[in-house]
Image (cartoon, helix red, strand yellow):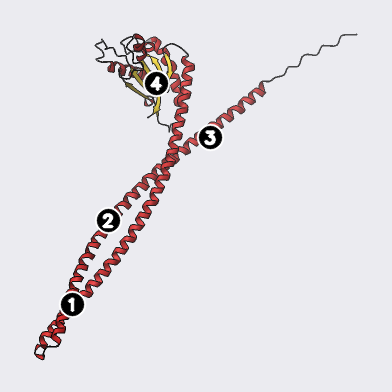
Amino acid sequence: MPARPRARPRHVDYWPGFVDALSTMLLVFIFLLSMFMLAQFFLAREATDKDKALLRLNRQIEELSSLLALERVGKGEAEERATLLSSNLAAAEKDRARLQGAIDEKASAEGAGGAALKAEKDISAQALAKVDVLNQQIAALRRQLAALEDALSASEKSGAESQEKIAELGSRLNVALAQKVQELARYRSDFFGRLRQILGERPGVAVVGDRFVLQSEVLFQSGQATVDAAGKAELDKLAAAVVALEGEIPPDIPWVLRIDGHTDRRPIQSGAFPSNWALSAARAIAVAQYLVSKGVSPQRLAATGFGEFQPIDPGDGEEANRRNRRIELKITER
């Protein structure tokens, strides 16, 4: 009886399932990235609208303040006129009383004095007419004062409402700025973590607080401001990390990578650099220029020199001098 053929082992192909899972993860990542960019866009637009509204409210407050000052000046002038008219009215009342007394005295006189009595009555009638005119002017001034007081009350109320709106906008702007600062701090932390991984734990390279510190010997020869070959190798790694960071931080966050040059306290013995200040600035500029040559945007770099005036070790020994000769990198707001 012939032998039965042996069954071949069955082969399972997992590759299509792996490709589907990878495609799904890529779509989810693209969706989350799109949502993040949309959120950043709307947040930036809202901050811009708040700035415009704040400027508009400030202009309205300035206009209201000008109107309030003019109304106060007008009220003061009206009060002065009312005081003057009141004094004129008092004087007219005195003249009226005096004339009335003269009329009463002359009324008992003989007919020979009739003509003088008539003249005095005419004068009294004129004084009464002046008094009536003064009373009308005082009433008009009082109405003007009442209108000015109403206008002042309305202006003060409007100013209080504007101040409340400004306070509310200010608090909302502070919240938005705090969010931007938190975002920048998160990117700074990620950047320094990435630098630790890239440069590793090696002598002359350390993270101190929010700064990345490279000893000058890692990048430069003694008394020189030209990056040597070993320093270029380290800066190549740094440049790659900064370029990657530029693509991750949203463009509406204003940030720069500050490059600070420091020296020790010993006076420099070189004709190329008249002071330690000049040497520290030249080294910071050399690092910035090399990073630019490796693709880092110059708008994101700031080079400064501090000379020997910002030591991290107050000692005078060789170890203190070595620690104080350094290049510091710090991400900060522009």
The type of residue carrying mark 2 is Leu
Residue bearing mark 3: 35
Point out residue 148 in the picture as x, y percentages from the top left corner: 31, 61
Residue bearing mark 1: 97
Who comes first in sequence, dot 3 or dot 2?
3
Q: Please tell me which residue is depicted at 34% across the width and 9% down the height of the picture.
A: 318
In the displayed structure, 126 sits above or below 174; it is below
The type of residue carrying mark 1 is Ala
In the displayed structure, 44 sits above or below 333; it is below
Who comes first in sequence, dot 2 or dot 4?
2
The type of residue carrying mark 3 is Met
How many angstroms separate mark 1 from mark 2 (CA)? Answer: 41 Å
Point out residue 160 in the picture as x, y percentages from the top left corner: 38, 51
Point out residue 37 in the picture as x, y percentages from the top left corner: 50, 33
Look at discs 3 and 2 and give the one toward the viewer: 2
Look at discs 1 and 4 and give the one toward the viewer: 1
Which quadrant of the structure image shows residue 205? top left
How many angstroms separate mark 3 from mark 1 (CA)? Answer: 91 Å
Residue bearing mark 4: 329
In the displayed structure, 215 sits above or below 52; it is above
Point out residue 330 in the picture as x, y percentages from the top left corner: 40, 23
